[in-house]
Image (cartoon, rainbow, N blue to C red):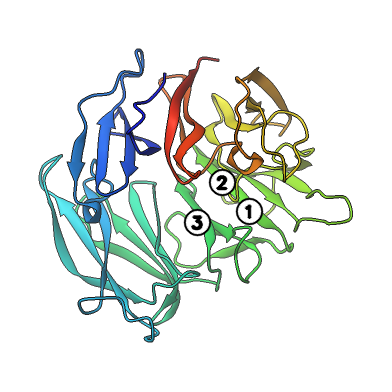
Amino acid sequence: MTLPPDSMYSELEVVGGRLYAYGELNSCEVAEVGPSTLALSPVRRFACDDWPPERRVIAVEQPIGKFYNDSAKVNAVVRIGVRSSPHGPAVLGPVVMRFGDYSDSHLETTYGDNSLWVYDCNTAGGSELLRVSLANGAVEARLAMPDICRPVIAAGPTGFWMGPASNSPGGWGLYHVIAGSRHPVLVDRAHRFVDWFVVSGGSAWADVFTPYSTACQCRHGELLRYDRNAAMPTFDVPDHGLFEGEPLQGAAVGGESVGLWTVAPFGRVSPTSQTGQDAVVRIDPNTGRWSYATKLTPIGVPSYDLGLSVDQGVFFQGRFFFLEPPYHYNGYVGASTIVRVTP
């Protein structure tokens, strides 16, 4: 379905059994997506500080003072907001974290295992992770973490997962905080970046890769699966160039029962190409083997706009939904199309 040309929708999320599209330009907005028709409900605008609007418990970042002080090591605080009604304002609690909000140390949050997880690598006490209850907004655990700025994070029934993104300035390793634990476990020591995690049921999957090689103009990627609290992967297999030429950080969705789903460039794509074609890809969750499910209409966008970006896809009611470029504002916000694929 083609989205309105003045829409700024850049994220999809399932909350409370409903599918929502989120966007931000001069203000933040949300619309519910009909899973059968792809029709959008009337747009509802809200304060961006209340993001995400359909969540009952959220992490709210605020500057220390009226503005962010770029000369201070610590210039921001985090408060937990709790809504008493689905669309009401979030009531903020006390400060739970102090940190320096800079290009390498923006606040990172994710939801999983009935918790909100809040991480930053530049807090007053070093790298720190909070686990926050979705029932009442209380901080249930505060963990010292390894120093990884610009991480990829995810959470689910097996706990919290973290590793360095491709633009991370330093820090290596794949870390797992087992559900109920207060200490991270190093499960992969290799110098590899993380493209994405999927955490579902009793398993976690990841796509990891070595730094880009100028010799072969490629990267060497691996697909991993970890089960329960295992410190060794169930499988570690090559991804055979599946994610060559995709965005800075990709994404996948799904799980054990439905498979892993993503969007990737169809065939080998040059990083400098100005056109390309996406394809929907299904990855077998038990073997890591992947196959093209369907090719999408070729689109005249730079290669860095191909693939599935973070928060732009969900698997919902047995179908794969995702946002597709071209984007309205230079590849950053406002996808033009929402796509539904039925396996």
Circle 3 sits in a helix, a strand or a loop, which is it?
strand
Q: Quadrant of residue 87?
A: top left
Closer-to-camera residue (264/67): 67
Q: Look at label 2 and name its amino acid.
A: Phe
Q: How dense is the environment of label 2, judged by Cα within 10 Å: few (below 14), some, or many (20 and up)?
A: many
Checking the image for residue 178, the label placed there is 3
Circle 2 sits in a helix, a strand or a loop, which is it?
strand
Horizontal side, residue 181 vs residue 252: left or right: left
Q: Residue at x 46, y 49 (%)?
A: 155
Q: Residue at x 39, y 72 (%)?
A: 101
Closer to the chain start, of discs 2 and 3, is 3
Horizontal and vertical percent position of residue 327 = 47, 37
Q: Look at label 3 and name its amino acid.
A: Ile
Q: Residue at x 54, y 24 (%)?
A: 258
Horizontal and vertical percent position of residue 247 = 60, 45
Q: Quadrant of residue 75?
A: bottom left
The answer, for residue 77, to whether it is visible in the render is: yes
Horizontal and vertical percent position of residue 343 = 55, 15
Horizontal side, residue 206 vs residue 116: left or right: right
Q: Which residue is mark 1?
A: 194
Q: Look at label 1 and name its amino acid.
A: Val
Q: Which residue is mark 2?
A: 197
Q: Are marks 2 and 3 in contact (CB under 8 Å)?
A: no
The answer, for residue 315, to whether it is visible in the render is: no
Say which of marks 2 and 3 sits in front: 2
Q: Are marks 1 and 3 in contact (CB under 8 Å)?
A: no
Horizontal side, residue 245 vs residue 250: left or right: right
Q: How dense is the environment of label 3, judged by Cα within 10 Å: few (below 14), some, or many (20 and up)?
A: many
